[in-house]
């Protein structure tokens, strides 16, 4: 393959390839799993830096390796143990940087950064990276508070940089298929969406273990970790279990609901809810956490409503799933795990509503129009259909491949700053409503929310 042909080939989005589909006997068949582009040579690769190398940073580094499209240049973290792990994952090759991310941004040989710090750092690091001329993959939620969104969007435009937000499911073949089905009209008019994110375990409720060797001022930099957050005394619980505290996270809503919201926006082609109301509480996990362990939210999108729920106290119902309920059928999507389509079966139970009429009148009514058929049931007998989709490469690998593709082509990323802002803002509106007891209204012109 000539260099230019090869370059054209590697520039093709991995998920564009994934979305090829055809209809056979009325059923959507997806062609074999997307093939990631051929591994790029060292000069065609994007040079990546990693800022924040905890749970997610490690997954993203492995995903970057799998794309075959990135050079892993430098990693920055506030805990030396995480830097040691980065060395182990790269046969000692990656440069390490202890708690000085601006020095990583100063490197001219880094094209783009992958940011996976806790949320309270997102805006500051993204703005610094953009003004240093880097393209940015920022983990979800893009923002710690709604007001951060417009600032990031403006900076990305001014510096002409790519921003991609990290809700990876939108790059999955499953989500592309789900979107195709909803957009085709096959489900009729979708007026309602239900979604849930439930867990029931110790670490699943964010009580993650803490490394035994952690020593503040020796191998861990607490002041740098705190960054723009309020100054409080050193407390490792706040570091490794930061999702339990408002100073660093928005809890269930911005950590988990934001995935569901991003997916709903993608599959329904929606931008923002008009209003959000929420309720919830700390009903079981009385372990010092500030964020609720149970949360319910109602979103009004104008043409459809969303009912979203999450709890850390029971996971017997669908762990993380979304149901799109249409007039002609429904689609149930378990994030990355399965997808079931079910046609509606409409039955007008006239036997019930006219049984009090004299018999003759009942008969003549049933003989009118389509009443007898309606009474017996119309439509296809509901047989749920399991829809197949390729689950490899995994959504995070595809999402990073899409980011790298955007960096190369300078085309808008798959999940732009605007998309990330809208998804995170809807999550913030849930928390604002939960904490104030008020319904929150979205102001599309200002990109902010206010109380009703
Ligand atoms: N897309 C997903 O499925 C997914 C999954 C998990 C986490 N996340 C997101 O990734 C982000 C990180 O989550 P996590 O679970 O990896 O948290 P984590 O606590 O395991 O890792 C965060 C890391 O950031 C480091 N850090 C903090 N401040 C820093 C700074 N100024 N400079 C350099 N490093 C700094 C910390 O030392 C820590 O190692 C969050 O925004 C979270 O929402 C996304």
Image (cartoon, rainbow, N blue to C red):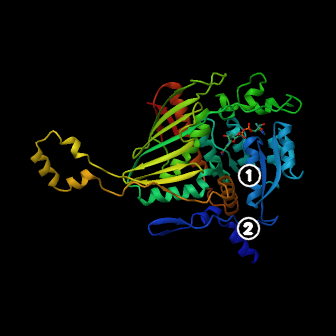
| Disc 1 versus disc 2: nearer the observer | 2
Residue that numbered label 2 is attached to = 38
- The relative height of residue 35 versus residue 349 in the rendered view (above or below) is below
In what quadrant of the picture does the N terminus appear? Answer: bottom right
Quadrant housing residue 162: bottom right
- The relative height of residue 39 versus residue 118 in the rendered view (above or below) is below
Label drawn at residue 335 = none
On screen, residue 31 versus residue 323, left or right, reads right
Instruction: Locate residue 343, reporting x and y percent.
Output: 40, 55
- For label 2, the SS is loop
Instruction: Locate residue 104, reporting x and y percent.
Output: 82, 46
Instruction: Locate residue 91, reporting x and y percent.
Output: 88, 53
- The relative height of residue 162 versus residue 1 in the rendered view (above or below) is above
Is residue 259 or residue 405 the one in the foreground?
A: 259
- For label 1, the SS is loop
Q: Residues within 10 Å of mark 1 (few under 14, many from 20)?
A: many
- The relative height of residue 201 versus residue 53 in the rendered view (above or below) is above
Label drawn at residue 134 = 1
Q: Residue at x 70, y 37 (%)?
A: 118
The answer to whether one can see residue 196 in this image is: yes
């Amino acid at each position: 393959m000539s260099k230019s042909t090869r370059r054209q080939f590697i520039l093709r989005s991995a998920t564009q390839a994934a979305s090829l589909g055809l209809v056979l006997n009325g059923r959507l068949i997806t062609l074999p799993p997307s093939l990631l582009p051929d591994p790029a040579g060292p000069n065609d690769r994007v040079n990546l830096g990693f800022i924040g190398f905890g749970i997610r940073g490690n997954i993203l580094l492995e995903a970057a390796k799998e794309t075959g499209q990135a050079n892993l240049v430098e990693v920055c973290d506030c805990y030396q143990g995480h830097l040691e792990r980065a060395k182990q994952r790269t046969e000692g090759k990656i440069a390490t940087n202890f708690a000085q991310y601006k020095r990583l941004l100063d490197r001219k040989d880094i094209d783009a950064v992958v940011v996976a710090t806790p949320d309270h750092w997102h805006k500051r690091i993204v703005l610094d990276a953009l003004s240093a001329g880097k393209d940015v993959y920022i983990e979800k939620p893009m923002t710690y508070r709604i007001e951060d969104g417009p600032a990031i969007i403006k900076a990305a435009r001014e510096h002409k940089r790519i921003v991609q937000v990290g809700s990876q499911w939108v790059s999955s073949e499953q989500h592309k298929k789900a979107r195709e089905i909803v957009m085709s009209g096959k489900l009729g008019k979708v007026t309602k969406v239900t979604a849930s994110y439930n867990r029931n375990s110790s670490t699943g409720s964010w009580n993650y273990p803490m490394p035994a060797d952690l020593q503040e001022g020796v191998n861990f930099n607490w002041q740098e970790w705190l960054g723009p957050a309020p100054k409080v005394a050193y407390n490792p619980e706040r570091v490794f279990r930061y999702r339990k505290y408002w100073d660093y996270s928005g809890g269930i809503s911005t950590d988990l609901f934001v995935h569901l919201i991003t997916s709903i926006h993608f599959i329904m082609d929606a931008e923002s809810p008009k209003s959000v109301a929420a309720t919830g509480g700390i009903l079981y996990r009385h372990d010092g956490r500030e964020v609720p362990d149970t949360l319910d939210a109602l979103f009004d999108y104008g043409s459809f409503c969303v009912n979203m729920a999450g709890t850390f106290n029971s996971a017997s119902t669908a762990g993380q799933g979304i149901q799109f309920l249409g007039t002609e059928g429904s689609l149930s999507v378990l994030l990355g795990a399965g997808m079931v389509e079910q046609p509606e079966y409409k039955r007008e139970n006239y036997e019930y509503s006219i049984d009090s009429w004299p018999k003759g009148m009942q008969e003549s009514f049933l003989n009118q129009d389509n009443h007898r058929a309606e009474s017996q049931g119309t439509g296809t007998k509901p047989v749920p259909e399991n829809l197949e989709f390729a689950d490899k490469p995994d959504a995070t690998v595809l999402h990073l491949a899409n980011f790298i593709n955007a960096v190369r082509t300078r085309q808008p990323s798959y999940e732009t700053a605007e998309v990330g802002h809208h998804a995170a803002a809807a999550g913030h509106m849930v928390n604002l409503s939960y904490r104030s007891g008020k319904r929150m209204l979205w102001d599309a012109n200002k990109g902010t929310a206010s109380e009703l």
